Amino acid sequence: MPLLDAASMEEAVRTAGRTAQPGDAVLMSPACASFDMFRNYPHRAEVFRAAVQALAEEAGVALEVAA
């Protein structure tokens, strides 16, 4: 199992998108606290969602939005 480092959420999502193969599971786990990167948990979730949305748009993939 490869371990890859990233300096930001956006970089982590791009790296996962570039590296993962069909059928792979990607585990994104911080190695330390991110106190200075995000205002709070909802902000961290929004940054993640935006990074995944950007990756999907680059790939021409439409994401399903949960209601």
Image (spheres, rainbow, N blue to C red):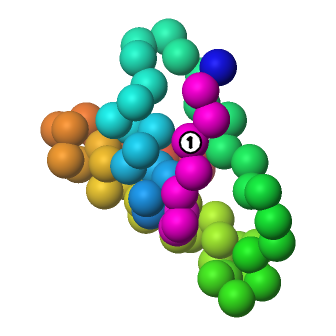
Residue 22 x, y percent position in the rendering: 41, 13
Instruction: Quadrant for residue 51, please give it.
Output: bottom left
The residue located at (19%, 47%) in the rendering is 58
* Residue 59 on image: x %, y %: 20, 38
Q: Nearer the viewer, residue 13 or 66?
A: 13
Return the residue found at the far right: 33
- The structure residue drawn at horizontal position 52% and vertical position 67%, both measured from the top left corner, is 8
24 in relation to 15, above or below: above
Residues shaded magenta: 2-9
Give the dominant element type of the magenta stretch: helix, strand or loop: loop
Disc 1: which residue: 4
Q: Look at the image and say whether residue 6 sits in the magenta stretch.
A: yes
Q: Percent position (x, y) of residue 44?
A: 65, 71
Judged left or right of residue 10, residue 29 is: right
Q: Quadrant of residue 38?
A: bottom right
Quick one: quadrant of the N terminus?
Answer: top right
